[in-house]
Amino acid sequence: MEFLPHAEFQRCVTRYGAARKLRRFSCWDQWLCMAFAQLTHRESLRDIEACLRAVPGKLYHLGVRGTVARSTLADANEHRDWRVYADLAQALIQIARPLYADEPFGAELDQTVYALDATTIDISLSLCPWAPFQRSRGAIKLHTLLDLRGSIPTFIDITHGRSNDIAVLDRLPLEPGSFYVIDRGYLHFKRLYHVHQSGAFYVTRAEKNTQYRRQRSRPVDRQTGLRADQTIRLSGVTTQHTYPDPLRRVRYYDAETRKRFTFLTNNFLLPALLISQLYQCRWNIEVFFKWIKQHLRIKSFYGNSPNAVKTQIWIAISVYLLVAIARKELNIKATLYTFLQVIGLTVFEKCPISEVFQKEPPRLDEANDAKQLSLFGI
């Protein structure tokens, strides 16, 4: 918790008036209890209550001043503004990104590269009627913009399962000069033209029915898998007006999977092979989604209201960022998965985190082997 900017946390609480009329169980108490649940993968509010009440002395030294009760925690998740923890996550993002600025991500490029995608989390439609998805199923979507250097999420939009993925492009924070690797599901030329006008670059896949006119072709090395590098203009009835500027069309053949890919981008300076490599790096966001679903508590929820669900998700993202920051600041060589598992096991140990990872495994005393009796009397 020392890596958490406590002053910034209090500013977030004050910004939304979340501490108004609170007597016993503060927002800090709520954060610590929910962070404990994420680190140790608690199953329910009753589980959180039972585990934390077993160590009252350690809770006091950690900063928990209120009485931990499942009803109190449920009420806090239900009514305290989720934006407090969303803003806290943004503060942690600003700390984490510089720490991972030099991390490789699979392509040699100096500019910042983002990947945009969404993942679906199933929830009960009867318990959460505000999150429709299909006829008898409910779900929420996590639209995520991921900085590929260090896999740091920089933008998350939580919507119900029926929301249109393309609409998130209207709310996306755009940085001039950065690259946005976008899945084919976000292909909307009017919105992509807005990305182009903002000074940012994008790489996406083309649909088979995309209508265009070829204006120029550049030579490619077919041994690398490239098949075409062209300058085109859209010729569709509406697309020629919604996107009037030229586009770059790159075709690539993957010999390993025997699949052909067609990419569209508004960048004409990068080598064509690097354009295809950038899109291949989009797989990092799929790994990120799989990681947080497996190792954080976001597939089942402690509450059913929109505020409780968003609170839990944003606290989970904050814990992910906090673990990434601590691992980098302490120069721990273990993977993020190993680091998280060890922290969850030693969450109340009174020793520096770095010492936990520096401890050597115990050595057996060979001199006492003669005193050890045989298990089977042989």
Image (cartoon, rainbow, N blue to C red):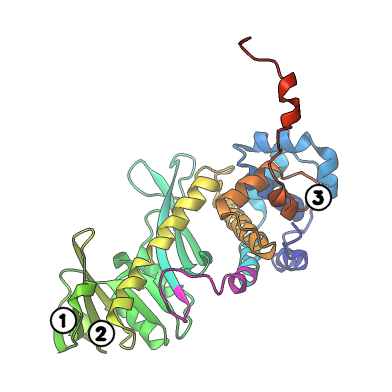
Residue at x 18% of width, y 60% of height: 258
Which of the 4 image quadrants contains residue 373? top right
* CA gap, disc 1 and disc 2: 10 Å
Quarter of the image where the C terminus is located? top right
| Location of residue 353 in the rendering, given as x and y in whole percent from the top left corner | 73, 53
| In the image, residue 25 above or below residue 265 | above
Q: Which residue is mark 1?
A: 212
Residue at x 76% of width, y 50% of height: 29
Which of the 4 image quadrants contains residue 44? top right
The amino acid pointed to by label 2 is: Leu
Whether label 1 touches label 2, CB < 8 Å: yes
Say which of 168 and 113 sits in front: 113
**Outermost residue, top direction?**
377
Whether label 3 touches label 1, CB < 8 Å: no
Badge number at residue 62: 3
Badge number at residue 247: 2
* CA gap, disc 3 and disc 1: 62 Å
The magenta segment: 95-113
| In the image, residue 32 above or below residue 209 | above
Instruction: Tell me the SS state at disc 1.
Output: strand
The amino acid pointed to by label 3 is: Leu
Q: Is residue 106 magenta?
A: yes
Q: Earlier in the sequence, mark 1 or mark 2?
A: 1
The amino acid pointed to by label 1 is: Tyr
Residue at x 77% of width, y 35% of height: 53
